Image (cartoon, rainbow, N blue to C red):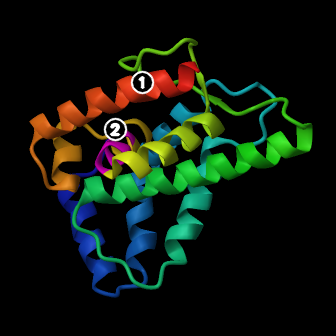
Amino acid sequence: MPRPSSDVTRLLDAWSGGDPQALDRLMPLVVGDLRQVAAKYLASEDAGHTLQPTALVNEVYLRLAGRRTVQWENRAQFFAVAAGIMRRILVDHARRRKRAKHGHGLLRVPLDEEIPLPEDDVDLVALDAALDRLEAIDPRQSRVVELRYFAGLTIEETASVMECSPMTVKREWRTARLWLFGELKG
């Protein structure tokens, strides 16, 4: 049974306030949700893939624990940051695998069903490169994709993290999906 959001928020506040044990008390409350996000990323991987959801969550924990100062606003922001860390871990992993196999065995991740794509899944390295290009053109749209797709946040949660209206998020999400479709199709 998931813990109330207030428990998570209270621990995020304690961590922001300098309590070094707050992260250790927080992780048991959010590990299930983080594993779900990680499993989503790894769902289309080959059966022999060595990176597992638990290992990905553990790596996120290590990177979060290494942060000297943190300022958390809410649960949605925490999951957005954690998803961004997962994205970087997976992209780095995919690049290492790509180099090791000279271009074979790319990490494949399905995109949200709302994004029209030429295939069922997308090369994570290509998606990351496309998001970097989108960020150079429109940082807000890139951030919306990161929060909606990688963090799995709702329209309302994304609006809260970005401090804008849900309608703005919907508009930016729609435009970014279309732009990504064009980039990934080519």
Residue 150 position, x and y percent, is: 44, 41
Q: Dominant secondary structure of the magenta stretch?
A: helix
Residue 109's image quarter? top right
Q: Amino acid at mark 1?
A: Asp
Disc 1 on helix, strand or loop? loop
Residue 151's image quarter? top left
Image point (52%, 57%), residue name: 85
Residue 3 position, x and y percent, is: 27, 51
Which one is nearer the viewer's eye here, 39 or 146? 146
Q: Where is mark 2, residue-wise?
A: 148
Which one is nearer the viewer's eye here, 56 or 84? 84
Q: Quick one: quadrant of the N terminus?
A: top left
Marks 2 & 1, CB-CB < 8 Å contact: yes
Q: Residues within 10 Å of mark 2 (few under 14, many from 20)?
A: many
Q: Which mark is residue 170?
A: none
- The range drawn in magenta is 140-145
User: Residue 126: within the magenta?
Assistant: no
Residue 101 position, x and y percent, is: 90, 37
Disc 2 on helix, strand or loop? helix
Q: Quick one: quadrant of the C terminus?
A: top right
Cα gap from disc 2 to disc 1, whole angstroms: 9 Å
Q: Where is mark 1, residue-wise?
A: 112
Residue 106 position, x and y percent, is: 75, 32
